[in-house]
Each structure stands twice: as structure tokens, then as C-alpha cells.
Image (cartoon, rainbow, N blue to C red):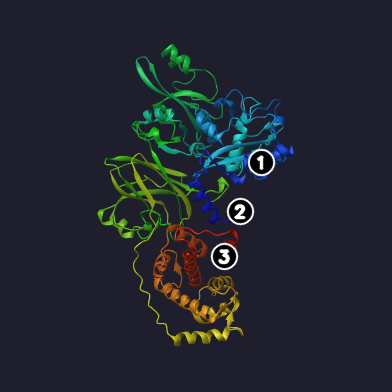
Amino acid sequence: MPPPGVCLEIMEVRHRQDSHGSVTSPKNFFNQDYQHLKQYCLIKGVRYIDEMFPPDHSSIGQGLLSPSDQARVEWLRPAKISPNPAFVLDGVSRFDFGQGVLGDCWFLASIGALTFQIDVLKQVVPLEQRFDDNYCGLFHFRFWRFGSWVDVVIDDKLPTLNGRLIFVQSKDQNEFWPALLEKAYAKVCGSYKDMTAGIPSEAMMDFTGGVHICIKLSQPPPDLWGLLCRAGKANALIGCGTPQGETPSNVLPNGLVQGHAYTVTGVKEMMSQGKLYKLIRLWNPWGKGEWNGDWSDNSPLWQTVSFQDREKCHTVCNNGEFWMTLEDFCKFYEDLDICSPSPDFLDTNSCSKWKTEMYFGRWVAGTTAGGCLNNKDSFWTNPQFRVKSYSEKEGEMLVSLMQKPDKRNRHLVQNLHIGFSVFEMTEQYKAQVGKFPASFFNTNAPVAQTKTYLNARDVTELLTLKPGEYLIVPSTFNPYETASFILTIHSKEETLCYENSGDHKYEPVEVPQKVRNAEHDESKRGVFRQYSDKYEEVDAEQLQKLLNDNILKGDLKSGGFSIDACRSMVALMDLSITGKLNSLEFIRLWNKVVTYKDIFFLTDVSRTGMLSLSELRNALVAAGMRVGDDMLNLMALRYGASAGHMTLESFISLIIRLDCMQKIFKQMSDGKAMHLKESEWMYFSMYT
């Protein structure tokens, strides 16, 4: 059983700080270690079978094959499919494979682009893998997944019908790197079925872990040709897609397929009859089916170019690859996606290098999911990031926002509409500590923002900003939508970036101070004795009745404190570790409960008897506790109801635990870190 998600998240942060999850030190997907598994198989003399992606119908997925075909599927190792299996034969090429019955042209188009960038390909596909003496049916591949590189282990059992591969198929039946790569990515997506339909940029990002820009070819940038040329020289993967038609995969009279992904495999300027043409070479991942217009394989225009250009570029072969002009490309294609390990291709200045900062955050309904600027009252609650540029001149900044799915199976992921706004800090707010209030956004317009909110995996904008300080606010279009995200900031200038949720200056909430005296305490002891045992102590069951009958009487919205909440309070307030509270410990608890009850109703400005999660911020401040967005989100998820509110009992339980945990840390730490032996940690965590 894996540790809880909060623990995993802390481990993830630590691993990133130690470069774990980098391309040179990838994480083990599903904690499967390739070297350890291989060593085990070799020692035992067995062929590996992957329990996490087993060779059965669950890995294919529902509805991809007919029931009759599904029943006839055989999972075979390469040696049972071909006489002389090899991982790679004569290098890797886009012409090595063709699409099978799986609708993953977007993925295969990305592989086609990958074959042009051998350095990038080696990161994804370890080419040293062999069917040799150390063969044990085990292979591995590497992908970048939402901020971290992962090493994905698979067995080499492949789904077949009548001895033939069902999905991607190599032109040479002895070559298996395409089929094994596809299987590894299917494992990452959840199943083969989960790879149906997509856009090339998704896989290209997972191959590079770098920068993605999407260009709408109906409105291309003026320097589109220069951008393509630079991208080709910068280890970039380039893909594109045609517009959707009335029917999927419909072949047009010009030979292009509607709603289909293609790979850009080359660019070249060609002189013909005294005119310079800008030509783009494209490849259809079907391995056949080509454009038949100007500069196609059979176009007479090839007879008008030099012998050298014709020899180098022109072939007459239905291999799915063809040339067309830049103008026709923009006319017949819809999107152009460029994914590169770095943003260097974006400009012609290669002297200065881009620097990258990456931040992981979360929108949580009711606390930090404020929606877009249309939502005046809640936009400010979104995560905020401060960026200060130390440059003395205007510079470019590339900002990318990617949403991170909370579902393993790709087909279950529903992308939200996401975007971001950039604000310049005015002098009035430069000294602001912590989160900027609603008043800032009501009086300051963004100096830059995403053109539109897209339900895409990521959105990116290249911004030109003058020196100064800025605030970047990522958001979903609608408020109250929960999701995780990655914000990446690339800049050539020296910048200081940090998340901005620290101490915020909220409107003060006046909490009446109770006057404590001996008479009041004696009255509480009298109530306490009515419920306590002969030793004048109460356990959790007695405490539950005492609190609900006396302190929360008349203010209950959900039945009062649960027995689990009372057990937790006993553990937190129990100084003698008896599992019970004596009168002194109880009075301390009583005073806390009454104080937090007063804060609850003072900050419940909507007068619903419930605390909205947005009101939770002020309630915490009124209690003298300031927390960042991440902790606020956790509190909302752990103690809030699904309807987006918090009951009085949940709020009191939360605030007592938070108060105790802060005091424990102060007592057991040096103010910065706390070191515990395993026995101490278990003793402390299992009781409190």
C-alpha cells in the first residue's frame, strides 16, 4: 500500500530538489525498477510478466475490439511472432512502421518527428536494448509526465490476432521498437484504448519535457518560416493537423485526410523558374496516402528545379511523405505544434540562454479556484506568482500553464478551460506582503494574458515585458473547479519568481475577549463532574456527549462532534497519555472550543450557520493563524463538505489540530526543521 498522497507530494518536492525525476535520473513508474527487475529475472531464469500492465483484456481496454476479436487475442513475445526478432534494425526511421487498428495517429506522428532528433530519441528509447543473452522479456522507455521524467517498464508480450500484431506494425516483421514503445505509452495512458484520439503535441511534450507552442495557421505569425527553420535546427519535434470533417479520417480529393495528424519532416527553399518557393515536407503516419497538389510526388514542378535539388528531395513513392508550399500548408492545415527541449528556437539571439522556473500549484473549489477576471469577487483567491525582472531593457518571457490530471486513465481526463493574466505592480502595491486583494484587480487591468481560455492540456504565451515587477495569476475560466497545474516561466533576463500566498492583510475581525475567572472555571468543573467517571476524567464517548449537550447545543448543523473527532481532541489535549481528559485538560479544551465557536459565527458573514470555504481564510486569521494556499487547500479538502462549506464542528476540530501541530513543531524543532527517530515519529503520529 503506497503512502498517502500528501506524503507522496512532499516526497515529490524533495525528489525534484535532488534532481530526481530529471532526464538523467528519472522516477520509476509504479515504483518498478528496471535494473532490479532484470537482475531478478536473470537470476531466476524467468521471462518477465508485468503485473501492473498485464497481458490481458484490461490492458487493451473496453470497446476497442469486437467481442469476438477480443476473445481471440493472443499475447505473444516477439520470438513467437517473427523468426529473428530485433529491437532496432538499421537505425530508426519514420518509415519503419505503419498504423494499426488503434486510432493513435497523433502518437505515431509524434514518433515520426522523434526519429529526426536522435539525441531526443535516445532519451525516450534506450537503444542499447537487445534480444541477446541477457534477454528476459523486459524493456523500458522514458517519458516526461507533468513535470517529471519517468522510466516505464513493460514486458514484451504484444497483442496479436492470427499471429499478427493488432496495433502499430513494423515494415520489417523482425523490428519491434515501435510496438514496444507504443505499449509503454499505452501503460502510461492506462490502456491501448486510452490512446484513441489526441493531438501530436501531447506525445511530443512527453518526448521532450520542454516548450510547446501552438500556432493557428489561419492567423500565422509573420516570421512563421523563420520559426520553422530555427525549430528544425533546435532538436524540436514538429507536428500539425488538418481540420475535422463531417466523417472521421475522410480522404479529400487533394489526398489529405480530414481530422488527421501529420509530422513536419523538413523545410527547404527551392528555386523554380526564377521564383523562390518555401516548401514544407510532411509525413502521414499511415505510411501511405499523400497530397496530390503542387510539389506532390507527381507534380511537373519538380522538373523546373536544379538537378541537385531534385536528386536530394524528390521521390516518387507512396510512403506517406510529400512536399507542399508554405501557402498551401497554411491553407489546408489547421494547427502547427512545435515542441522543443528549450525555447532557443523562438528568437535569433543565440548568445544568451533561457532560464526556466517551474511551479506546482492547485485550484481548489471554494478556496483557490476563483475563476477568470469576470468573477470580480473571487478572482483574487486564485494562486498568485510574483516575478521581478532585474533587466534594464525590455525583454521576452515565455509563460506556460499546464493542467495536471487527477485520473490515471487518459480517456477519463476532462480538461478545464485554463488561462492566465499578468499584472504590472503599481508603486502602491510594491510593498504588499502576501496575496493581493480584490481591490488591486478591480483597479488594475492586465498588461498581458492568454488570448482565450482553452480546454487544452497546456496554454503558452510569449510576452514582451518592460523591466519591473509583475503578478501572474493562473486560473480556470469558471470558479469552483478543482485541478492541479504546473506554471513554467522561461526568461532570458535575470528574474526572481516566487509563489505569493504568504501572509495576507485581511480585514480584521474583532473577537471579543472572554474574561476568565475562578467562578467561571468552577462552573465548568461542575458541568464536567456530571459526565466524568469516579476518577473525574472523561473519555471520548463522555466528551462527545458533554460537548454536544452543553457547548454546541442549539448551534448544530450536522449532528454535533463525531466520536472520531472527540477521540482526536482527547489525544491532542491529553497531557498524561491516559486516553482521558482530567478537569484541567477539559477546561483548556472548553475555552478553546468556545473561542473558536465565536470566531466561526463572527466570520460567517452569510449567516448560514456554515462557513463557506472562502470565509475560512478570515476565520483562520481571526484565530491568529496564517497559512499559505497549499495548506488552505488541504484543510478545505480534509475538513470541508462536498457542498463547499464547513460545519462548526469541523472548523473547531480543524483549528484545534492546527494549533496543536504548530505548538508541537515549535517545541520539537529548531524553528526550521524537526528530526525524529522512527519510533518517535510512529509514537507521535499514531496517537495524535
Quarter of the image that includes the C terminus: bottom right
Q: Nearer the viewer, residue 84 or 21?
A: 21
Q: Residue 663 at x, y = what percent?
A: 47, 67
Tell me: residue 140, above or below residue 87. Answer: below
The amino acid type of the residue labelled 3 equals Phe
Q: Nearer the N terminus, badge 2 or badge 3?
A: 2
* Residue at which label 1 appears: 37
Q: Circle 1 — which element?
A: helix
Q: Is residue 181 left or right of residue 330?
A: right
Label 2, label 3: how far apart the Cα atoms are: 21 Å
Disc assigned to residue 289? none
Disc assigned to residue 684? 3
Q: Nearer the N terminus, badge 1 or badge 2?
A: 2
Q: Is residue 233 visible?
A: yes
* Residue at which label 2 appears: 2
Q: Are marks 1 and 3 in contact (CB under 8 Å)?
A: no
Tell me: residue 282, above or below residue 643. Answer: above
Q: Circle 3 — which element?
A: helix
Tell me: residue 144, above or below residue 252. Answer: below
Q: Residue 186 at x, y = what percent?
A: 60, 40
The residue that appears at 52% across and 47% down in the rendered structure is 15
Q: Are marks 2 and 3 in contact (CB under 8 Å)?
A: no
The mark tally for this picture is 3
Q: Residue 45 at x, y = what percent?
A: 74, 37
Mark 3 surroundings within 10 Å by alpha-carbon count, few (fewer than 14), some (14 through 19), many (20 or more): few
Indicate the quadrant where residue 81 lies: top right
